[in-house]
Structure formats: structure tokens, C-alpha cells
Image (spheres, grey):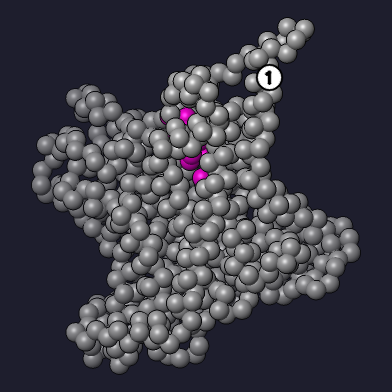
Amino acid sequence: MSTNNVASSAAAVEKGMEKVFEDHSEGMDYLDTTRSRFITLWLPLGLICFVLLFPFYWMALTAIKPDNQLLDFDTYNPLWTWEPTFKHINKLLFESNYPRWLWNTFYVAFAATFLSLIASVFAAYAIVRLRFKGADTVGALIFLAYLVPPSILFIPLSTVIVAYGLFDSPLALIMTYPTILIPFCTWLLMGYFKTIPFELEECALMDGATRFQILFKIILPLAVPGLISASIFALTLCWNEFIYALTFISSVPNKTVPVAVVNEFVDGDIFRWGSLMAGALVGSLPLVILYSFFVEYYVSAMTGAVKE
Amino acid sequence: MTTPASPKSGGTGHTASTWERLQSDRNWLGFWFMVPAAFFLLFFLAYPLGKGVWMSLTDIKIGRPGQFVGLENYEELILYDKTFLYATGFTLVYTAIASAIKFALGLYLAILLNNNMPFKSFIRSIVLIPFIVPTVLSAIAFWWIFDSQFSIISWFLRKINLIDHNINFLGDPLMAQATVIFCNIWRGVPFIAITLLAGLQTVSPSLYEAATLDGASRWQIFKNITYPLLTPIIAVVMTFSVLFTFTDFQLIWAMTRGGPVNATHLMATYSYQKGILGGQLGEGSAIATAMVPFLLAAIMVSFYGLQQRKWQQGAKE
């Protein structure tokens, strides 16, 4: 399976990972002049960063622009406003279902992440450390499950959801999101568990600890960084999920933020852009804040997900 | 690999030794430990996957159980449904162009970020923001940026006198296709750049120093050192990128819903349109199932590529 093929690059990447954010090497930069550095480094980098970040600036700016400046690019400078207004955000938070949608998204994301994490911890431990018969096959199958995209599953899954009586309930999302999260979390945690020395477990076994005790008292405390990476990344994936939420939820108050912003804000109003952008901004902020606190964990989760 | 060697079971015959009991114990324990994950993956992934294939062979509609009709849905799609063929073609073009540019830009950005510079970690972390923000929400921002009347880009281009009327970004079929491809690239580059950067960090600087002393040019260094050493991680990252680009749904649905005149339909959005909005669950499943061979082909190519690479490097695993 591709497990073994990439394993060597895996170890290497893991080492590289630690350095992505704390690499102080000087390299061979002394060979470059300031001018060539500007052209080969700062100019393209600045350009790319501008393109990557401009949509967010534009989103945030539109969200706080007063209506009369929203569409009039000639009288007012479109790239700045001196009269920021919180009208759109206010309307969003106090006169619409938005808080409810935010809560739905939170609730579904946390519940699905929690369930997936529990299932993944057991699965990863069993595959890596219990080495039961067929563990490798199960590991490979879980990897394959990771490659099954939601967009080929949503139609049959919707009939399954209806059959189980979960349609239009948050439970539909809580039960289906783990199919995206478990393969990812399991592979990430397998990588972490493998780095924990076997001897620790052997000692505990000798002292008469059960597998449960070993898992909860020895392995998990040592795998905390892996658990953090897996859970924040899983939260992000849930927050980002769209197609299941679009298909399985029909009543307006039960929607999640991404679906609600796409479906409920689009009335023919020419000034709708203000509230649309406010909706997008407020919906993105929780993730960006989470990200700013856990940058390294995100990166290790990301590379952890591809490295195996 | 750090997989522990599983203890050899005695198998000597007469009585079950302690080891053997532990071994059987361990299999049972493994089974119990796998139950929660298996529950989700069997009921909500494997079963629907199989059911989807079955549904694609029936004429099931919303609110009406289906009859088995064999390959009729596929026949219908391939022979009579021009939109399906067009969507399949556009999905392939979308995936090919977006993945190629994402790869080139991602690699370039990774190399730029690998430089030693002030505020390095800050720059590296803001680059990843497009990946963090939910796709739909940034797609909405792009929808506004590419608005037909009030696009900031049109305004800017008019300001510098490059154009004299607004560009109809999402109204003109070809333009709309280019625009959604651009947005997909925008969203995908940070992921590729940061993962490749992680790979770049593992390349020993002494290799670059040695090559520089031997008089190698920047391009030679890239071609003969950086690229070969990165190949394994590139293969994995690009497999993921191709898979997720091919099955993209969110971006298109938030920006164009497949319009104008079905020009930007991907297979995923078209199957949603047919299956859920149109109620033709059978045909919708057939479209979704039709994606599987393409996905398998993509996985095979990268798997084979990796295999060959290993063989060339003489690594044994």
C-alpha cells in the first residue's frame, strides 16, 4: 500500500515540519545583493501575498462600509472608508437567525470532532500497537476511506439519512462528518503513536496495567500535541463542510453558517453585499482566531495528513 | 517504519501457551477497539458507497422507490445528455489547469518562503489563511469581487485605462470558467506551498553549498537537487490536490451554481442539480458514480509513480 512507499518521506517531512516556523538558518543569502533579492524574493512574494489576502481585506471593508459608499466607487475611495459602520454586523447578530446558525455550526463541529477523536484514538492505537490480525489491511482501508470524497456520497447518503430518520436534524451532520474526520484523525494519530517508545508500554504491561490503562495513562498524555492537531484540524474541516449540510438540512433555523450565508442572504437587494460580507466575515473569524493560536499544530496536521 | 515486530506465536501444538492466549486476546481487543470507527465508516461511508452504485442502476426518484433499469441511466447520460458530457469535459479541464498551475505556483511560493528573511514565520502563517477560511465564505467574497457591475477589478482596470467597460466575469461562459479556475487556484496554492515547504526544509543546505561551489546555476540547483528530493512528497500532495479539485462542489455552487448556461458545471454540481434539485436520485447517483473511474485512475497514476521512484532510488521497504 502507499503506506510504505511514502513512509521514508514521512519521517523526513516530520523533521522539516518542526522547522517550518522556527528555522533560523542563514543559508547562502550573503551571496545575493540587496537589489537582486528585491526582484527575486520580495517582489513576487509581495505580489502573491497581496493576491492571497486581498479578498479578505475587501470582505472586511465591505462589511463595515455604509450603504451609500458600497457601490459608488467614483465619489468615494473604494479601498478605504472613513465612516465605518457596524450596521451590517449588528443586523446580522441581533435581527437575523445568524447566532442560531453560528451555534449550529459550533455544536455540530464540536460534537463530530469529539466523536471522531474517540473513535480514532482507539482505532489508531489498535492498528499501531495492538497489531491484531489484519491490522495492516484495516489501516490501508482507512486510508482508502480518506480518499472517498463527500461529493460522490451525498445522494445515497441522503436516502440513508432519511431511512434512519435523521433528516433535517443536526444529528444527521454529527453522524456523517466523522466519515470525513475519522480517516484523517486516525492516520494522524497513528503517526504520533508510532513515535512513542514501545518500552514504555512493555514496562506498564509487566506491572500489570491493562491496555485501557496504558492507552489513557501513558499513550494519550504523550500524544497531546497530536490530539490538539487532530482536533483543531477536524474542527476546521467541519466548519468548512458544505455539501452534506446543504443536502441533509432543509429548515432555515437548522442550517450551518456556510449554507445559510449562501442560501438565505441572497435576496435581490442591491445593497445585500454589506450583509453578505458581514456574514462571511463573522463566519470566518472564529477559525482565523483559532488558527492564530495554533499555527504550528495546523501545519503539522496538514503535513501529517499527506505524509503517510 | 517503526512498526513493532509482532511476537511470533508458539504454535507448538499441545497446550495453549501464555503467548498464544495473549495473541488471541489481542485480536479480540483489536476488534473491540475498532468498533467505534468501524461503526461510522461502515454505516455512513461503505454502505452509501455501495448503495450509490446500486441506485445508479435504478430509476429511483425522491419519494418513489426505484426499479432496476440496468445501465439505462448511463446510456441516457452518455448518449443524450449534452450537459453531462460538457460537465465531464469541463471537470477534466478544470482539474488539469487548476492542478498544474497550483503545483507550479505552490512550488514557487514554497521556494520563496524557504528563503531567510525577516518576519519569516509571520509571512508563512498568513500565507495559509485562504486555506483556513471556509471555501464557501471566501467564494462569496470572490463573487462580490467579480460582480458584473461593481467589480473592484473592473474599476481598477478602468481607472488605469486598460478597459473601457466592465468585464462580465461571471456572466460570460468562458470568462466564468476562467474565474472559477482562478478561485480554485487561489484557494489551493497555500496548502501545496506549505506542505512542499515542509519537504524543502529537509533538504540539507550542504547540498546547495556544494552545488554552488561547483558553479551550478539556480536553475541547475533546482532541477538536479531540489526537485528530485521533493518528488515523493510532491506525488502525495498532488494526488490529494487532484482528487479534491476533481470532486469540487462548494466553490462552483457558491459562485455560479453551474451557470451561465451550464458552462461551469462540474460533475459534482451537476449530480446535485439532477439528483437533489431535480429529484432524479438514480441519474444523480450515476453521475456521481461516473466520477469513480477518474478518481481511481488518478490514484493509480500517483501510486505507480511513487512505486517507480522507489525502485529507481533502490529503497527497500
The residue that appears at 45% across and 50% down in the rendered structure is A231
Between B139 and A201, the one lying in front of the other is A201
Q: Secondary structure at mark 1?
A: helix
Decide: is B68 above or below B120.
below
Q: Nearest the camera: A121 or A61?
A: A121
Q: Position of residue A181 (x, y in %)?
A: 54, 51
Residue B235 in sight from this viewpoint: no
Figure quadrant of residue A167: bottom right
Q: Is residue B299 above or below residue B221?
A: below
A57, above or below A202, in the image: below
Check the residue under mark 1 and report the chain it is in: B
Residue B225 located left or right of residue B59: left
Q: Main secondary structure of the magenta part?
A: helix
Locate residue A132, reporting x and y percent. 64, 27
Residue at image point 86% right, 66% down: B66
Label 1 crowding class (10 Å Cα cut-off): few <14, some 14-19, many 20+? few
Quarter occupied by the N terminus of chain A: top right
Is residue A191 on the magenta stretch? yes
| Residue at image location 31% in from the left, 64% down from the top | A53
Magenta segment boundaries in residue numbering: A183-195
Q: Mark 1 highlights which residue?
A: B21
Q: Front-most of B240 and A119?
A: A119
* Amino acid type of the residue that numbered disc 1 sits on in the rendered structure: Arg
